[in-house]
Amino acid sequence: MNSQILNFFDYLEKVINNVILTDILISIFILALVLISGKIFNLILRLILKPLFKKTQTKLDDLIINVLIKFDNRAFWVIGLYFSSNYFMNQVESEKRLKKILSPETYNFLVGASVIFYDILFIAVVSLCVFLLSKLFNISMDYYADKKEIKKETSTLYDFIPLLRKVVLIILITIGILIILNHFKVNVSGLIVSLGVGSLAIALAAQETLANMIAGFVILIDRPFREGDRIKLPTGEVGDIYKIGMRSTKILDFDNNLIIVPNSILVKSTIQNMTYPDYVSRVFVDVEVSFASDINKAKQILIDIAKAHPLNLKSFEPLVYLIDFKSNGVLMRLIARTDDYRNVYQIQSDMREEILRRFKGNNIEIPYSQVVIHNKGN
């Protein structure tokens, strides 16, 4: 195949009998060939791949196809000019007959112009690749955000998406610049070493900040808790997640105080999430009953109190356990459930009030510690 093409080029040169014109015509032929290939590729995308990908469940492939369809016309023009200019430049530099035909000034100008035009197109091809990869990454992030229903008003991960886009764009631009510098015979090894040393210095200087940022990103991906969840910290504080930030997580406690915890500490700690996987929460009330009281009657009263409460979860049957013997009586625990963890303290308060009233009306004694003092006279 290559020999046939070379024979065709030789034949074309004999027919035209002009070296420069032959090289120009062959360069135009290469450009036309690339553009025709681009049209064929575009037709394949539109008529075959696009209808095929519409049948898939995901929409990501449809978005990628639409970008490629809009992008391929410009891309193939740049690629075609790049290959044609590359051919013309190589021919001009290797064609010895041109030096005899043209004056030294004209020949040097032709060689210099072709090299400059080729270098410009090389930069354009690299920039095109960087832009295309960045566009595809942004589409993937938008698709992920839509799929996970990540919105600015409801999710902190929304704030990380622009940051991630910028980081990826910077990485792609850096790679593109290194490729361009390498094309111009610039030694990039020293630059890479300098970037590595600089990155190491920045990482060491901002070690804690970077650790917190990475931990925040891990929290948003792993999602051990979400904004609005009620958690219990290892130190004993209980509060609702107010905001998951890049450096720290803010927790609003019951006194309306904001507890700010670095993300790196949260990642390494054991956190109790009271609202995951759902808002259903246990409600328990401990009450002590004297030994002289009717235990079975006390148990039934506790069950009736739990069942009668409007916030009690009806699908769960309340339970009463005798969990310990005390010095003045037995300790009983009433266990119920509610469909919202925010109702726990209100239910406990209501039940304790009702227990006092019902126990008093049914002669069930709640014992209290008594101290007897014996006064020994002289």
Image (cartoon, grey):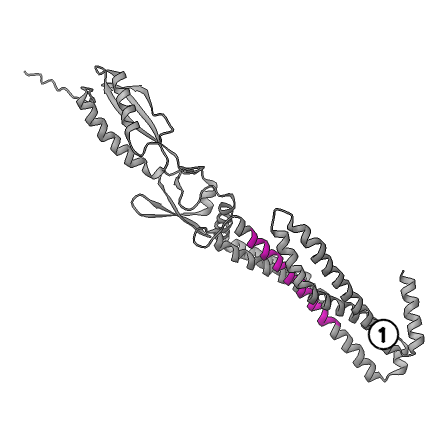
Looking at the image, residue 357 sits to the left or right of residue 152; the answer is left
Residue 113's spot in the image, x, y percent?
76, 78
The image quarter containing residue 195 is: bottom right
The answer to whether 356 is drawn above or below residue 375 in the figure is below
Quadrant hosting residue 320: top left
Q: Main secondary structure of the magenta part?
A: helix
Q: Nearer the viewer, residue 246 or 305?
A: 305
Position of the N terminus by quadrant: bottom right
Q: Secondary structure at mark 1?
A: helix
Three-letter code, disc 1: Asp
Inspect the magenta stretch and tell me whether residue 239 lies in it: no
The answer to which of 56 and 360 lies nearer the viewer is 56
Image location (x, y in percent) of residue 255? 29, 45
- On screen, 275 above or below 359? below
Quadrant containing the C terminus in the rendered view: top left
- From the viewer's perspective, tell me whether residue 52 is left or right of residue 378: right
Which residue is tagged 1? Answer: 23
Q: Is residue 261 left or right of residue 219?
A: left
| Residue sticking out furthest to the left | 378
Which residue appears at 50% of the width and 54% of the height?
160
Label 1, residues with CA under 10 Å away: few <14, some 14-19, many ≥20: many
Residue 33 in the image: x percent, y percent?
A: 80, 66
Task: State the residue in front, 198 or 113.
Answer: 113
Q: Which residues are magenta?
A: 118-143
